[in-house]
Amino acid sequence: MENDTSMILGALCALTILASADAHADTVITYDDGSTYTVKDSQEVYVSSKASSLFKRRIQGKDTFFYVQEPWASRDYVAEPTDGLTVGSHEWCKAFVPWTSGLSFDQVAFNQACDTNGDSKYGCGDTQFDGSEDGDVCSSQT
């Protein structure tokens, strides 16, 4: 019985060690404009203020040269016009561009909450739009 208990504890310890080796968090840099960049596992990150410059060192033969490092321009997420708006709200429906991401959860929400007349756009004829403060333009179009 004691041997079985120690074997079970040993197996649990081994599983815990293996599971913790797989657990890691991505480093994500968030920029003032709302865009982000996810740092890859093999990348090194240096942070500096706009007032200072970061230099790269290059050795050619016996000479050493220093070059100003350009700021990293790559992003993997760029802010969308609908960010910060409640999905399905009148403002969100106006800002959403249908089918830009293919069939997504946002597209399904748009189809159900915004495009009630099925014309693949949000405007006159859609229940929520007609009932909003912008709905006044619809009566002048008839």
Image (cartoon, rainbow, N blue to C red):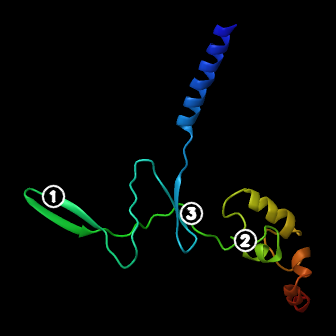
Q: Is residue 94 visible?
A: yes
Mark 2 to mark 3 CA distance (whole Å): 17 Å
- Marks 2 and 3 close (CB-CB < 8 Å): no
Would residue 98 be found to the left or right of residue 62 on screen? Answer: right
Q: Is residue 115 visible?
A: no
Q: Please report whichever mark, 2 or 3, sits nearer to the chain's N-terminal start.
A: 3
Q: Please report whichever mark, 1 or 3, sits nearer to the chain's N-terminal start.
A: 1
Residue matched to label 2: 96
Q: Which mark is residue 59?
A: 1
Looking at the image, residue 122 lies above or below residue 132: above
Would residue 66 be found to the left or right of residue 75 on screen? Answer: left
- Disc 3 residue type (three-letter): Tyr
Where on the picture, by quarter, is residue 44?
bottom left
Looking at the image, residue 96 lies above or below residue 59: below
- Marks 2 and 1 close (CB-CB < 8 Å): no
Q: Within 10 angstroms of label 1, few (less than 14), some, or many (20 or more) residues?
A: few
Q: Please report whichever mark, 2 or 1, sits nearer to the chain's N-terminal start.
A: 1
Residue matched to label 3: 77
Disc 1 secondary structure class: strand
Q: Nearer the viewer, residue 97 or 89?
A: 89
